[in-house]
Image (cartoon, helix red, strand yellow):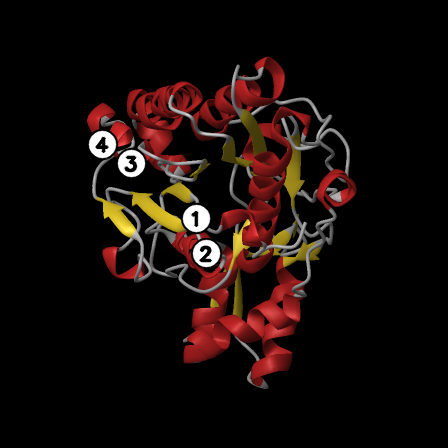
Amino acid sequence: MEAGSSVWRGRRALVTGGAGFIGSHLVDALLAAGASVVVLDDCSSGRTAQVPEGAELVSASISDTASRSTALSGCSAVFHLAAIASVVRCEDDPELSASVNRQASLDLLAEAGITGVRAFVFASSAAIYGEPQHLPITESHPLAPLATYGADKAVVDEAITTLGIEGIAATALRFFNVYGSRQDPSSPYSGVLSIFTQRASSGEGVTIFGDGLQTRDFVHVSDVVSAMMAAGESLLTHGTASPAHATPFNVCSGVTVTLLDVVAALDAITQQPMDVTHAPAREGEIRDSFGDPAALTAALDWTPEITLEEGLRDLLEQL
């Protein structure tokens, strides 16, 4: 289904984490499609300035019951992105992670099911897979998260895709390495591409942990938004008969990229080769990871459109 269709006109959508990197882009798309949008975000990692004009902001934690109730009022769809995104912070404070990333998410899901919400899209993560047992990673890959962040995400993911929630059509989208504009390179939550791009723009060198041949699957934020829109539209239109209902999907490019590939691409774009320093590999870091987007393509006719070079050029233009 084409994003921006009339499905959204006259509907109210809640975007938790809508002041953040991915969420603010999604709010832009929903507003452009004719939806009215409420954002629930305490701006602990997002920024108030990133909430697009025209959206209503409820400035509160996803853990606050009263604020969730206010934000849910009148909504047809919920896109749940709010989370403690720092793996390190979740490890340091697992009780906080359990409260926010797990319990508040389950509470929101349950409340959505009894307040008339027709579509619920959960921002899950490839972190739930843990160390890949096979590549590319498909949705049937065992869930074996290595850390608290992934474990809490997995609980909510499974609540949607295994158990199902009575009365509400819901899906879990498993994001791989998302990058794009509004991702602050100085943030501890930021991805490697925003950091490398910022340093390429300023003529600084980069440090690579290990040999630089570790692979990742980078997917542009605009492609992630189009996947979320397609999922939401299918759930709204078809309800529990939607091919997205109670089904997890990888949101990824399906392309393997090494960190040295990223450096080479930036060098080619800027015509200013970066100095690269190698440091010892980080203990416990996954060596290779990339996903298979075929299930999402088959179900919702979604395909990633932004190549790595296009995405890096876009990032450089935003700096």
Secondary structure, mark 1, is loop
Image coordinates of residue 104 in percent, x first then y, are 34, 24
- Residue 119 shows in this picture: yes
- Residue 209 shows in this picture: no
Q: In the image as oriented, which residue stretches furthest toward the front?
A: 10
Q: Which mark is residue 67?
A: 4
User: Residue 93 or 22: which is nearer the viewer?
Assistant: 22
For badge 3, the amino acid type reads: Ala
Image coordinates of residue 202 in percent, x first then y, are 41, 79
Which label lies toward us, 4 or 2?
A: 2
For badge 4, the amino acid type reads: Ser
Mark earlier in primary sequence (4, 2) = 2
Q: Residue at x 78, y 42 (%)?
A: 294
Tag 1 and tag 2, C-beta contact below 8 Å: yes
For badge 1, the amino acid type reads: Gly
Q: In the visual, does 274 lie left or right of 19?
A: right
Tag 4 and tag 3, C-beta contact below 8 Å: yes
For badge 2, the amino acid type reads: Gly
Q: Residues within 10 Å of mark 2 (few under 14, many from 20)?
A: some
Q: Residue at x 37, y 38 (%)?
A: 82
Which label lies toward us, 3 or 1?
A: 1
Mark earlier in primary sequence (3, 1) = 1
Q: Residues within 10 Å of mark 3 (few under 14, many from 20)?
A: many
Mark earlier in primary sequence (1, 4) = 1
> Residue 222: which quarter of the image?
bottom right
- Which residue has dot 1 on it? 10
- Which residue has dot 3 on it? 71
Q: Residue at x 50, y 71 (%)?
A: 315
Mark earlier in primary sequence (2, 3) = 2
User: Residue 218 or 261: which is nearer the viewer?
Assistant: 218
Secondary structure, mark 4, is helix
Up/down of 284 relative to 313, above or below:
above
